[in-house]
Image (cartoon, rainbow, N blue to C red):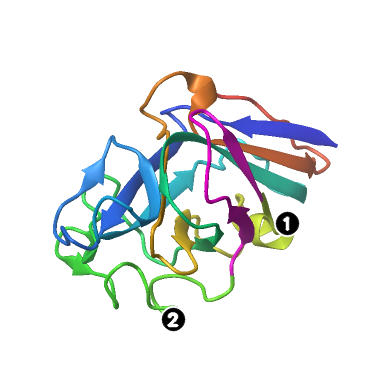
Amino acid sequence: MALGTIQGTANIEDCYLQASNPTTNFNDDSIIDGQDTTDATVRRGLIQFSLTSIPSGATINGGTITLTVRIDRSANARLLSFYRVRRDWVVTEATWNAYSTGNNWTTAGAADTTNDRESDASGTVTQPAVMAVDEKLSITLTPSKLQDMIPGGTWTNNGFLLQVATESDDAILYHSTNQGTLANGPILVIDYTPGSSGLFTKYW
């Protein structure tokens, strides 16, 4: 078995969608999910990890995404789900209404489970009501979901939508890949068994 660590701006793109500003792109900011206790707007995160460093033919044994808290604006514990995205969204263009300029989500907020995202989550975790600054939250991904996304798989890697179950007074702002130190940005660690000719190269 081998471990592949994917992190850094060369390998990750992220942004968030905001219902109260449905045509504004929020790139180079936090990754946010839930509804902020300081306002009434709902936010959902988008994140995409480059998986090209995982060799084609590898068998995925497991995968874990780790996020680091930047600001806690939540008063409730919620189930946080990661859904595989069906749309080829553009990180500098995606908004609540559109996944890229001139191309709308079927349902705003990437909510349609036929065209925008999957209905069943690739991973879930309980997001606590209170989290400390720089506290880590780890999400275990379903290996078969990740298997389909690596080179040679059957699913186009359009990353994940982050959404909490209730979206009421439960927003957490996580460090994006463009903020702070490398260790505080999103990290995906993949446990895999290489194929007969597969070798892994880390990119930072």
Q: Residue furthest bottom?
A: 114
* Residue 198 falls left or right of residue 137: right
Say if residue 50 shows up in the picture. Answer: yes
Q: Amino acid at mark 2?
A: Thr
* Residue 154 falls left or right of residue 162: right
Residue under label 1: 143
In space, the residues marked 1 and 2 are separated at their CA atoms by: 22 Å
Image point 62% across, 59% down: which residue?
124
Image point 56% across, 40% down: which residue?
52
The stretch drawn in magenta includes residue 49: no
- Which circle marks residue 37 in the picture? none
- Quadrant of the frame with the N terminus: top right
Where residue 24 sits in the image (x, y, percent)? 15, 53
Tell me the SS state at disc 2.
Answer: loop
Frontmost residue, 74 versus 99:
74
Where residue 74 sits in the image (x, y, percent)? 43, 50
Q: Amino acid at mark 1?
A: Pro
Tell me the SS state at disc 1.
Answer: helix
Magenta-highlighted residues: 121-139
Q: Examine the image and state in which quarter residue 15 appears.
A: top left
Q: Dot 2 surroundings within 10 Å: few (below 14), some, or many (20 or more)? A: few
Image point 76% across, 41% down: which residue?
191
Residue under label 2: 114
Where residue 133 sits in the image (x, y, percent)? 48, 30
Frontmost residue, 45 versus 5:
45
